[in-house]
Image (cartoon, helix red, strand yellow):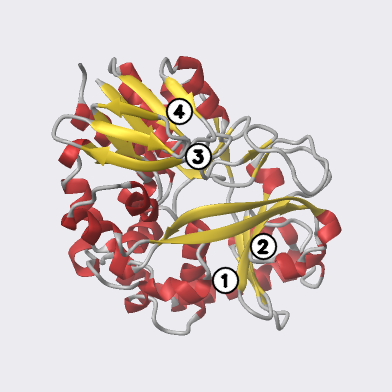
């Protein structure tokens, strides 16, 4: 069969790779001049745009928990090397206060100060036990159509930290986290915190390169699609330049808010499933500014640290650890910390268009999964799973299984 895959991010490229293995004729349409979607590996699929830099640094997907079973299996199939990393974290408040994880404490302090910081963390952990139990034993049914504020509605430090972990995972501003779907966040917070973590050696985009080495289909970059038409026996992809191609099936591997802009003939059911989705535009910055740590006497940054600014919270990820750099120069990836970073220390800034997860939009997620294949149309994307990389890979496997071999 001739199959069009719309979108060249993780879910799109893995879907194309799996369908190609099954013997289908696959064409990938990507509107950006490069592949990868939210995979942004500096000096692989993107180039630095603020200052010169030759290091392989991540500006998108960073690390992966060992609970990502489908992702790890795919990396093994593609001969992509994964390396273990230690993960630490800390909260830094604008009033000068701080709370460090055990990993962060042991990296920065010894003697009495280490003991004091450890006691503070242990007290926080003990006070948060009821909250951990509440999230741990929340059933999927109980989280249906519930916002995260239903579970993290108090003003405790434990609730704040869990909200910030959600902010870090999905790059959504903290003031929007209360309406984040609990059905998506609770399993993530429950299953991905107390696990070991891995990084992709050579940069996350290297696994897209491995796919391209094996892929026999077509990849069309810088393509703007005007309309997608569907009839009883075919799908027509019409580009903005007037070119048109016909396919047997189409796979949407785009953020869900883009589905309605592309479909020329959406059904009432599709309008209901996708109209509530909006885009979340996240800006990340790669930089070398260590001054954010100086007031807190921190010499060894954690893999993801949270900072409170005058207006909001943001995160700072330590790329030396996450990217396996041996350089004495510190490199970071930040979100919503631009006001704290010296512009002369910025290496790269990148916009990411991700789904804006809201309780209202998310309520039809399972219906999209159940009705995959209607009108020769399939859907893949992280939003159809955990919202993270495992969800992207799992959704691609689902589509390949549904379409099957020739």
For label 4, the residue is: 75
| Residues at marks 4 and 2, CA–CA distance in whole angstroms | 33 Å
**Of marks 4 and 1, which one's residue comes earlier in the chain?**
4
Q: Which mark is residue 121?
A: 1
Classify the position of the C terminus by image quarter.
top left
For label 3, the residue is: 31
Residues at discs 3 and 2 in contact (Cβ within 8 Å): no
Q: Residue 27, percent across and down?
A: 39, 25
**Of marks 4 and 2, which one's residue comes earlier in the chain?**
4
Q: Of tags 4 and 1, which is closer to the observer? A: 4
Q: Observer-nearest residue: 177 or 402?
A: 402
**Of marks 4 and 3, which one's residue comes earlier in the chain?**
3
Q: Residue at x 33, y 24 (%)?
A: 18
Asked if residue 186 can be seen in this view, the reply is yes
Asked if residue 385 can be seen in this view, the reply is no
| Residues at marks 4 and 3, CA–CA distance in whole angstroms | 26 Å
Q: Residue at x 31, y 40 (%)?
A: 228
**Of marks 2 and 1, which one's residue comes earlier in the chain?**
2
Q: Observer-nearest residue: 23 or 302?
A: 23
For label 2, the residue is: 105
Residues at discs 4 and 1 in contact (Cβ within 8 Å): no
| Residues at marks 1 and 3, CA–CA distance in whole angstroms | 46 Å
Name the residue furthest left: 232
Q: Is residue 101 left or right of residue 108?
A: left
Q: Observer-nearest residue: 338 or 119?
A: 338
Q: Is residue 384 above or below residue 170?
A: above
Q: Residue 1, percent across and down?
A: 24, 20
Residues at discs 2 and 1 in contact (Cβ within 8 Å): yes
Q: Is residue 1 above or below residue 198?
A: above
> Residue 374's image quarter?
top left
| Residues at marks 2 and 1, CA–CA distance in whole angstroms | 9 Å
**Of marks 3 and 2, which one's residue comes earlier in the chain?**
3
């Amino acid at each position: 069969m001739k199959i069009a895959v719309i979108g060249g991010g993780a879910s799109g490229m893995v879907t194309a790779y799996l369908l190609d293995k099954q013997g289908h004729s696959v064409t990938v349409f990507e509107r950006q001049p490069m592949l990868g979607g939210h995979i942004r590996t500096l000096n692989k699929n993107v180039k630095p745009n603020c200052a010169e830099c030759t290091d392989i640094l991540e500006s998108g997907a960073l690390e992966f928990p060992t609970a990502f079973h489908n992702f790890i299996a795919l990396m093994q199939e593609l001969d992509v090397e994964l390396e273990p990393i230690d993960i630490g974290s800390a909260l830094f408040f604008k009033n000068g206060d701080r709370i460090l994880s055990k990993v962060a404490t042991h990296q920065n302090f010894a003697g009495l100060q280490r003991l004091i910081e450890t006691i503070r963390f242990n007290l926080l952990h003990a006070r948060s036990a009821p909250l951990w139990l509440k999230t741990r034993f929340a059933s999927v049914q109980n989280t249906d159509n519930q916002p995260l504020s239903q579970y993290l509605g108090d003003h405790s430090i434990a609730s704040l930290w869990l909200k910030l972990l959600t902010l870090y995972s999905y790059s959504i501003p903290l003031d929007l986290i209360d309406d984040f779907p609990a059905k998506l966040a609770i399993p993530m917070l429950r299953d991905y915190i107390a696990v070991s973590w891995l990084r992709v050696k050579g940069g996350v985009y290297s696994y897209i390169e491995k796919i391209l080495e094996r892929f026999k289909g077509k990849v069309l970059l810088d393509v703007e699609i005007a309309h997608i038409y569907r009839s009883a026996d075919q799908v027509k992809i019409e580009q903005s330049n007037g070119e048109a191609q016909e396919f047997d099936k189409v796979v949407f591997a785009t953020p869900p808010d883009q589905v309605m802009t592309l479909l020329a003939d959406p059904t009432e059911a599709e309008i209901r499933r996708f109209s509530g989705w909006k885009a979340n535009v996240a800006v990340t910055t790669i930089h070398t500014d260590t001054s954010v740590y100086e007031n807190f006497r921190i010499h060894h940054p954690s893999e993801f640290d949270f900072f409170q600014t005058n207006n909001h919270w943001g995160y700072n990820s330590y790329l030396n650890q996450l990217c396996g750099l041996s350089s004495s120069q510190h490199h970071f990836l930040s979100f919503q910390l631009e006001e704290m970073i010296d512009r002369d220390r910025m290496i790269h800034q990148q916009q990411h268009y991700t789904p804006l997860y809201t309780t209202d939009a998310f309520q039809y997620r399972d219906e999209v999964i159940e009705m995959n294949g209607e009108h020769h149309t399939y859907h893949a994307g992280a939003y159809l799973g955990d919202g993270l990389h495992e969800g992207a890979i799992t959704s691609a496997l689902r589509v390949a299984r549904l379409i099957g071999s020739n």
